[in-house]
Image (cartoon, grey):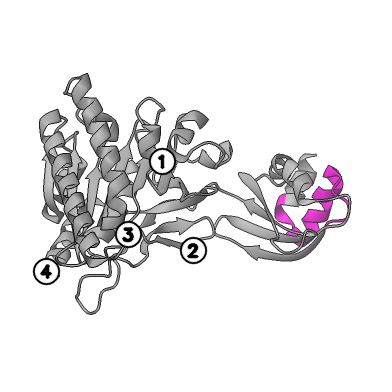
């Protein structure tokens, strides 16, 4: 058995696949193409009955053992039921990827409506997303890379034109490094300044709504007069923690109203937490976020507190690399590795943004 496995791991896949298929009873599967991926190899198969995508998916774990791999993923062909792609991953993640500032040859602020590059997917392709008019939720256990994810998005926002960052940092830690980029920053978990800021933001939302009503339009695009306002909260679970029960309830209500009313008038939020549990992540507020990123969590229930039920498979969260996340923007979650933006890269980036 050991000799057989040794051969299967070293022979070309077009030769070793039939050996594995015979052993597992997958008769009638023919390799049509083999390509290298960022994590290993992709094997394209043509199927004959009784084989199917479902059957091969059920044997994914056994395939991983037979080939000595970290994971096997099975992807159905969207057009043909008799075709399938089997991804043989030698590792669970592409690993840490260094952040590279976006090119800006014109030395002008970047377009706030552009897709902001945030990382790479498991195929090594860059992942970018347009966040205007949409709120974001990032959650994961301590050490999972919450700050890694937040920094990349902050970098994209800070270098954009017509963007106004407003922050609340109950822990007085991460957002302090970004102080020059913020128009307003509340440090600490006292209730009063948090309530004051949220009320001011809601007043601005109301002002913009009245402005839209006067212009007979439904959407407000970023401009110098009405920049895209992004409320950044570094630790959602600690928001107003020093306040009493009524104050904390008021803060949650104000935040929910801001998310609900602000979208159409260019007012959104970036919420981060290292306590992704059902008692700290308010379901009503979470429902108002469009983009949800779950980094490594303690169990399935914590991941569901961020992404929602039925959006991912539990084994997708198994990665020790900080910054690896599952991303859902309304449908099935997909994996990505956030770029790693170091402490040393932040000051030059903010200096460049200030000159713009």
Of marks 2 and 1, the one in the foreground: 1
**Location of residue 54 with respect to 309 vertically, above or below:** below
- Whether residue 10 appears in magenta in the rendering, the answer is yes
Name which quarter of the figure residue 153 lies in.
Answer: bottom left
Closer to the chain start, of discs 2 and 1, is 2
> Callout 4: helix, strand or loop?
helix
Q: CA distance from mark 2 to mark 1?
A: 29 Å
Instruction: Find residue 129 and report its horizontal and vertical position in percent.
Output: 40, 60
Of marks 2 and 3, the one in the foreground: 3
> Callout 1: helix, strand or loop?
loop
Mark 4 lies on residue = 355
- Whether residue 2 appears in magenta in the rendering, the answer is no
Instruction: Find residue 289 and report its horizontal and vertical position in percent.
Output: 38, 45
Name which quarter of the figure residue 241 lies in.
Answer: top left
**In the drawing, does residue 317 fall left or right of residue 78?**
left
Mark 2 lies on residue = 125
Please report the residue visible at 72 percent of the width from the left and 64 percent of the height from the top: 79
> Callout 2: helix, strand or loop?
loop
Residue segment shown in magenta: 9-29
Closer to the chain start, of discs 1 and 4, is 1
């Amino acid at each position: 058995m050991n000799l057989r496995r040794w051969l299967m791991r070293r022979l070309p896949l077009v030769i070793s696949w039939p050996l594995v298929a015979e052993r597992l009873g997958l008769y009638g599967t023919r390799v049509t193409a083999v390509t290298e991926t960022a994590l290993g190899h992709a094997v394209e198969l043509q199927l004959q009955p009784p084989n199917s995508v479902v059957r091969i998916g059920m044997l994914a774990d056994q395939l991983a053992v037979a080939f000595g791999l970290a994971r096997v993923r099975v992807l159905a062909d969207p057009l043909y039921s008799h075709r399938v792609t089997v991804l043989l991953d030698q590792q669970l993640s592409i690993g840490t990827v260094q952040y590279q500032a976006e090119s800006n040859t014109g030395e002008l602020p970047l377009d706030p409506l552009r897709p902001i590059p945030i990382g790479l997917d498991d195929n090594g392709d860059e992942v970018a997303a347009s966040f205007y008019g949409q709120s974001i939720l990032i959650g994961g256990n301590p050490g999972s890379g919450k700050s890694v994810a937040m920094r990349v998005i902050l970098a994209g926002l800070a270098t954009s034109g017509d963007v106004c960052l407003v922050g609340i940092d109950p822990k007085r830690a991460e957002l302090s490094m970004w102080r020059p980029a913020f128009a307003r920053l509340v440090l600490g978990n006292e209730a009063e300044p948090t309530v004051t800021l949220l009320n001011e933001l809601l007043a601005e939302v109301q002002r913009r709504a009245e402005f839209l009503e006067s212009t007979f339009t439904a959407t407000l695009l970023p401009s110098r007069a009405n920049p895209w306002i992004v409320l950044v909260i570094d630790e959602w679970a600690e928001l107003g923690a020093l306040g009493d029960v009524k104050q904390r309830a008021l803060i949650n209500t104000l935040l929910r109203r801001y998310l609900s009313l602000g979208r159409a008038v260019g007012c959104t939020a970036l919420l981060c937490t290292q306590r992704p549990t059902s008692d700290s992540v308010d379901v009503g507020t979470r429902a108002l976020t469009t983009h949800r990123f779950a980094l490594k969590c303690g169990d399935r229930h914590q991941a569901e507190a961020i992404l929602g039920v039925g959006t991912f498979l539990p084994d997708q969260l198994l990665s020790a690399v900080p910054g690896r996340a599952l991303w859902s923007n309304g449908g099935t979650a997909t994996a990505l590795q956030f770029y790693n933006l170091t402490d040393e890269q932040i000051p030059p980036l903010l200096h460049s943004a200030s000159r713009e």
